[in-house]
Amino acid sequence: MTTTASAITTTTTVADRPGKARNRILWTLQIVLGLFFVIASGGPKLIIPNTLMDNAPENLTISFGLLIFIGVMEVAGGIGVMVPRLSALAAAGLSVLTVLAAGTQAFIADKPAMAIFPLVLAAIFAWITYERRATLTQLRSVLAR
């Protein structure tokens, strides 16, 4: 009986390894992309919005208030994707935001080639949302209390 329990434990441990590797990949992506959205994408929109409006002619069609709102959403999503309980919800929000960014690049800025990067980010955030979907259920149960 002890031998069987030992064999089952070994099998279970071997079966858990791909999950651990996927979890590490997900957290690495979440941290890198979260920092990207806080530091490189959303941060400049909040710190130096006037300079961005002056230097990027495609932003002239976007109002100043909308630029600030997008910056706040990017920073909030970047922080949220690094918080375990909020990661799926934040990734879903960033997925929608990056699809809208791709649409802006393709149709408003008239640079469809620039829409590829936001679409790749949207796919990555959709994958993170799918993999972290258990946190959505946990968050719903916490909010229902």
Image (cartoon, rainbow, N blue to C red):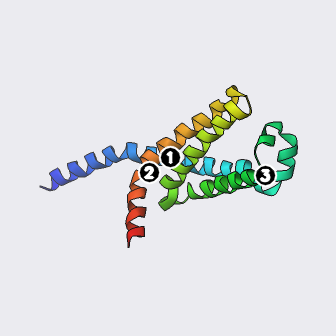
Res 83 → quadrant? bottom right
Position above or below: 57 against 31: above
- Numbered label tally: 3
- Residue 43 in sight from this viewpoint: no
Tag in front: 3 or 2: 3
Percent of width and height locating residue 73: 64, 55
In the image, farthest residue toward the top:
113
Name the quarter where the N terminus is drawn. bottom left
Crowd band around label 1 with a 10 angstrom C-alpha radius: few (<14), some (14–19), many (20+): some
Under tag 3, what secondary structure?
helix
Residue 14 shown left or right of residue 96 in the figure = left
Percent of width and height locating residue 25: 51, 44
Which residue corresponds to mark 1?
Answer: 26
Q: Tell me the distance, in whole angstroms, between the alpha carbons under discs 3 and 2.
A: 34 Å
Q: Amino acid at mark 3?
A: Phe
Which numbered marker is on residue 64? 3
The one of 56 and 29 positioned closer to us in this rendering? 56
Crowd band around label 2 with a 10 angstrom C-alpha radius: few (<14), some (14–19), many (20+): many
For the residues bearing labels 2 and 1, Cβ distance under 8 angstroms: yes
Q: Amino acid at mark 2?
A: Arg
Under tag 1, what secondary structure?
helix
In the image, farthest residue toward the bottom:
145
Res 80 → quadrant? bottom right
Q: Tell me the distance, in whole angstroms, between the alpha carbons under discs 2 and 1.
A: 9 Å
First-in-chain label (2 vs 1)? 1
Percent of width and height locating residue 22: 44, 44
Name the quarter where the C terminus is drawn. bottom left
Percent of width and height locating residue 99: 59, 39
Which residue corresponds to mark 2?
Answer: 132
Which residue is located at x 83 percent, y 53 percent?
48
For the residues bearing labels 3 and 2, Cβ distance under 8 angstroms: no
